[in-house]
Amino acid sequence: MIETLVVPLVKIAVLLVGILTAVAYLVLLERKVQAWVQVRLGPMRVGPHGLLQPVADVIKLIIKEDITPARADRWVYTLAPIIVLVPALVVFAVIPFGPETNVFGIRMPLHVADINVGLLYIVSIASLGIYGTILGGWASNSKYPLLASLRASAQLVSYEVAVTMTLVSMILMAGSLSMVEIVESQQARGLWFVFAQPLAFFIYFVGGLAETNRAPFDLPEAEQELTGGFHTEYSGIRFALFFLAEYANMIVIAAVATTLFFGGWLRPFPSVAALGLLDIVPGWIWFLLKTFVLLYVFLWVRATLPRYRYDQLMRLGWKVLIPLAIANVIVTAIAVVVL
Amino acid sequence: MTDPHPVTATRTPVQFDTDELVINMGPQHPSTHGVLRLILRLDGERVVDADVVIGYLHRGIEKLSESRDWTQIVLLTDRMDYVAAATNNLGYCETVEKLMGLEVPRRAQYIRTVLAELQRLASHLVWLGTHAMDIGAVTVFLYCLRERELVLDLFEEYCGARLTYNSMRVGGLPADLPVGWDRKVREFCDIVDQKIVDYEQLLTQNRIWLERTRDIGVISGADAIAMGFCGPPLRASGVMRDVRKDEPYAAYEEFAFDIPVGAAGDTYDRYLVRLEEFKQSTRIIRQALDGMPEGPVMGKVPRLIKPPAGETYHAIESPKGEIGFFIASDGKSLSPYRFRVRPPSFCNLQVLPKLVRGHLVADVVALIGTIDIVLGEVDR
């Protein structure tokens, strides 16, 4: 009873609260990092160094008037933010935050579910969010959001191909689709896969930037051109849901990258026994640390680079990243068979 | 090569074609630099045609000037190109001086040159920042405004104002330089020269920046002349035309400086030309400070400024291009009989529809940025 029902429910609750808090503070972190790069201070007024800013933002967004444009498709308009957010949260179910650990005397793995097609699950569920983007832009019945959602659909579909291809090469390396087994395979080899597959990681990361609509690929929400993009007409809590989803997706991309390429919960250099001292640090802390570093790179890139143009983005996706990813799969497959 | 989009004087009637999407950009659009409004006809994301609608910031400065006395008009010129108020002041004052045949002391000429070049730096900093931000590089914007702040501090110390300076008078200047000002200006020049390197590292060789600006909005030198392009955009098309060299005013004749000229006439060349102008401006400022003559800063000006009957046109090189003033005086009243400005932003803006045709929506904002307009000057 406890094992089958209570523990998973508690895990889900902890995970949801944790992710939503992480998202709120990721927004703050983004504003702070951007500000520091740009010789500003960022939020400073709410709480010490603006630490309570996320709370203020949430309250503001909730009490704001929630407007539905008169000519919008009411049902789809309401549904779209939910379609975006739910998949972004659900994919966390298969992400292993750490090895089996004792929590309050109960021995349990630090993930909600270890399904044998974990990676496939992530890929398929995460893509569902695109529907929300497209429908949101379409249902607003407004020209700028429509343009933006067309951009979004083209962009997300094409970059997903490249990202999925890199995942295929990782599956070949690990010989499994289960997220836990992928980490264990890295443990067995004593090697983070990023060192074996740097190209795959690069393609995955660039594709990940594009899939989460982050700079330099933030075309669907290009402020300067489309005045906010597909969520231009949204306000209040529904806008907040889009916002939450974007940052939750960033965390997903970073967490999956950590699992696949950076050894998940493993300490640095898992094969070097001399560094055994580092094992004092629990696995989940290593995991969160690596995810955090990757997220920081997301923010850093945004503060540094200009934005690609729509057609250039498509060209980069189809003519550079996808061929590279396919070539990488072939080379990996040959290497796995030969070695 | 024939021009695929010949420039015609008549406006094409708006057709309600089901294949084209008409969207309205502005006047509150975040990246139209003020209150510019564009009506774009799109085929997908490709711009088929653009209509520029202006006039949202019209304050009737030219007509207003005809009922203000000659000294008061200086502060109206501040409010035209408010990003480069000092060069507007300079253009107006020199025109009136030309009309009256006034002699301006050499020291005043030198200080005017320094002020005009500082103003060019400030204006180009705003341009670079907003242009980069339109293309998505937000950080450059904040860096540029950080340096512009230093120029504003210098102007504040000189004339007390930070935006609308009212920094010149007919016949000279309102005040001599504050003590220690020239040292601060030199320090500022050193800072700018260093920071330019930073900006170049962020943008000049950046792949994305190159892809976003190369071959975007190409205009040939002949077309540019035909359409009245002026200033850095004209020079980027390979036309050597700079009022500072061609018809020197203030003290420009006495300084050595180069006029950067582009070749391709695309957005990237316009960017490079302006970046080089930064360096030339600091060069001029340093020379002017080194050779600063002693003497008064105000010439012999009658207490009541009342130019003789006649008319004149005088142009100077503002950061945006050639700003010209046509002033007619009837010799009797205390205000101009006719006051007319040739605003560089306005003349450059009329090229925009030609530039954007065939490009994507994302390029439209890049092209608005590259011609560097200030709506206060376009509408006046």
Image: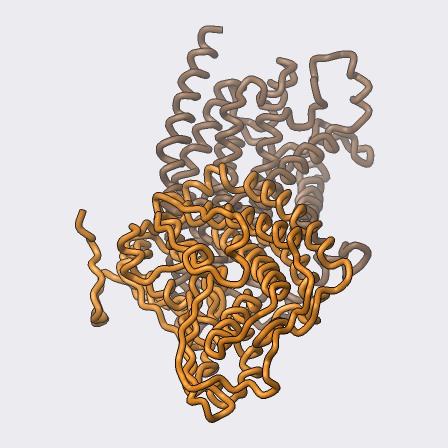
**What is the x, y in percent for residue A63?**
64, 70
The chain letter corresponding to orange is B
Q: Foreground residue, A293 or A136?
A: A293
When the figure is inspected, residue B171 is found, relative to residue B351, above or below; the finding is: below
Indicate left or right for B54 with B46 as reference. right
Q: How many marks?
A: 0
Q: Foreground residue, A6 or B264?
A: B264
Q: Residue at x 63, y 71 (%)?
A: B173
**What is the x, y in percent for residue A39?**
69, 50
When the figure is inspected, residue A102 is found, relative to residue B175, above or below; the finding is: above
**What is the x, y in percent for residue A43?**
72, 57
Q: Tell me the quarter of the picture where residue B39 sits.
A: bottom left
Q: Foreground residue, A312 or A122?
A: A312
Q: Foreground residue, B339 or A254?
A: B339
When the figure is inspected, residue A130 is found, relative to residue A263, above or below; the finding is: below
**What is the x, y in percent for residue A335?**
46, 11
Indicate left or right for A59 with A314 as reference. right
Residue extending furthest toward the left:
B2
The chain letter corresponding to brown is A
